[in-house]
């Protein structure tokens, strides 16, 4: 398959295939055996309604409550089989394009200038496999000066067992534009042995602002490897909220922002829950290459049951007048869960200010005693403290999603400490 792609993309995919066997596996995350689940997908078919999606995929989508959010556009991909998109013409401004990436690369030859230009194709075996076999993804382009008031929504659903979903999404915010993208990634409960490895490249041009909210909730035996790289130009701003409600069997994510422009900035906030025997490896990185660039990275995690959670944060300054703050906080529930934190600060210049705070452990006895003195049982006190620690209000989410995140957190807490 792939004959329908333009020549430049067919050439890039052939080149990626040549690298697969020469590259090492990913440095972080639980090991994966991809050979058993890779497949050559047929071309995506478009469905006219959410009701036309497979019933189990529709149910998984509705469980995220994304449908309750007032959105200017919606795009949903099921495996690499079905694609659905909807525009609310009354609120989406002129100058905004949303389509499947497979369609976009056929329509716009200039996309070759953005294809694997933020993310290195040969970083490891997984990235090369993605480059060789990717199907679908969301292409979002916002014209210069256009400000999208209501979020654009995308959702990727893995509906087949022993399957690798490899969408490639590209977001381009032209100078002085603004956009908020809400992405949901999920799988029906019966799906097992599958992988979601969506790769996203975001280009924030001069004076533009991009807000990205990602919510992941996977079935018990699903693996997730979201790959993301962001380039921010002069005066641009990138804000990311990453919420991992259920990591599935394993998840590894390390979104990386390159602050290339003068006075560019980023805020990245992550809250995650490790449950059952999940392997969770989540972090974020900011490279401060532009003079006066700024970064704030906040990573909060709860580990329960026998899960292992690793938090990795990094700020690297190579320009004067820069600043970065890293916060890694982890709470362990029970006696068998593990949390490890790996904050990294690196400065190649004198005129920079880099800070980090890290704290891992259980809630203090004094906190529990105080709440228990107010009439709460020990389990109720622990639950209250977890809710406060993972409060989604810090993410400034749309109200329906905030309510759903809080509800799911409550269910997980009850299961974990009950």
Image (tube, rainbow, N blue to C red):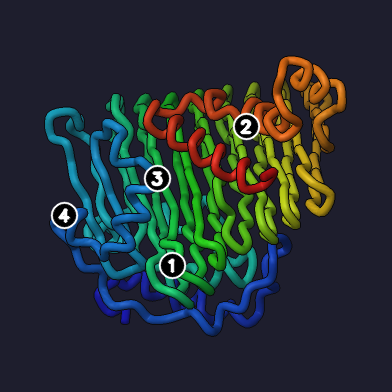
Residue ID at (53%, 35%): 241
> To which residue does mark 4 refer?
49
Q: Quadrant of the N terminus?
A: bottom left
Mark 1, residues whose alpha carbon is within 10 Å: few (<14), some, or many (≥20)?
many
Q: Residues within 10 Å of mark 3 (few under 14, many from 20)?
A: many
Kindly identify the residue that appears in the image at 33 percent across and 33 percent down.
151
> Helix or strand or loop: what does disc 4 sit on?
loop
Q: Which residue is label 2 attached to?
A: 390
- Give the left or right position of residue 59, taking residue 223 as reference: left
Q: Earlier in the sequence, mark 4 or mark 3?
A: 4
Q: Which callout, 2 or 1, points at the residue further toward the start of the chain? A: 1
x 80%, y 40%: residue: 344
Tell us which disc is closer to us: 4 or 3.
Answer: 3
| Residue where numbered disc 1 is placed | 165
Judging by the rendered image, the residue that carries numbered circle 3 is: 64
Frontmost of labels 2 and 1 is: 2
């Amino acid at each position: 398959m792939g004959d329908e792609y333009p020549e430049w993309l067919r050439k890039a995919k052939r080149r990626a295939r040549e690298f697969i066997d020469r590259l090492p596996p990913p440095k972080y995350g639980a090991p994966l055996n991809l050979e058993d689940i890779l497949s050559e997908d047929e071309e995506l078919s478009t469905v006219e309604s959410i009701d036309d999606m497979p019933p189990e995929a529709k149910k998984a989508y509705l469980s995220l409550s994304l449908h309750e959010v007032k959105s200017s556009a919606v795009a949903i991909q099921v495996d690499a089989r079905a694609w659905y998109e909807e525009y609310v013409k009354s609120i989406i401004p002129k100058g905004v394009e949303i389509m499947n990436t497979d369609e976009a690369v056929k329509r716009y030859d200039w996309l070759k200038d953005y294809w694997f230009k933020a993310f290195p194709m040969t970083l490891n075996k997984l990235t090369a496999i993605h480059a060789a076999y990717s199907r679908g993804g969301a292409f979002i382009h916002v014209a210069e000066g256009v400000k999208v008031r209501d979020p654009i929504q995308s959702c990727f659903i893995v509906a087949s067992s022993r399957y690798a979903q490899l969408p490639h999404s590209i977001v381009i915010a032209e100078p002085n534009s603004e956009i908020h993208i809400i992405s949901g990634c999920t799988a029906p409960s019966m799906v097992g042995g599958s992988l979601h490895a969506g790769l996203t490249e975001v280009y924030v041009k001069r004076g533009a602002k991009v807000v990205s909210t990602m919510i992941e909730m996977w079935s018990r035996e699903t693996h997730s490897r979201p790959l993301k790289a962001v380039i921010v130009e002069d005066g641009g701003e990138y804000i990311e909220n990453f919420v991992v409600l259920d990591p599935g069997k394993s998840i590894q994510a390390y979104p990386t922002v390159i602050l290339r422009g003068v006075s560019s900035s980023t805020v990245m906030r992550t809250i995650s829950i490790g449950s059952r025997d999940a392997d969770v490896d989540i972090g974020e990185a900011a490279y401060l290459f532009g003079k006066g660039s700024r970064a704030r990275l906040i990573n909060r995690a709860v580990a329960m049951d026998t899960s292992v959670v690793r938090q990795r944060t990094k700020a690297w300054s190579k320009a004067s007048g820069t600043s970065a703050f890293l916060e890694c906080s982890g709470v362990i529930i029970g006696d068998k869960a593990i949390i490890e934190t790996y904050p990294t600060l690196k400065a190649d210049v004198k005129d920079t200010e880099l800070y980090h705070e890290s704290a891992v452990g259980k809630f203090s006895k004094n906190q529990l005693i105080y709440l228990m003195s107010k009439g709460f049982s020990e389990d109720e006190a622990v639950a209250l403290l977890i809710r406060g620690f993972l409060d989604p209000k810090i993410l400034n989410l749309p109200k329906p999603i905030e309510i759903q995140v809080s509800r799911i957190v409550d269910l997980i807490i009850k299961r974990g400490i009950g």
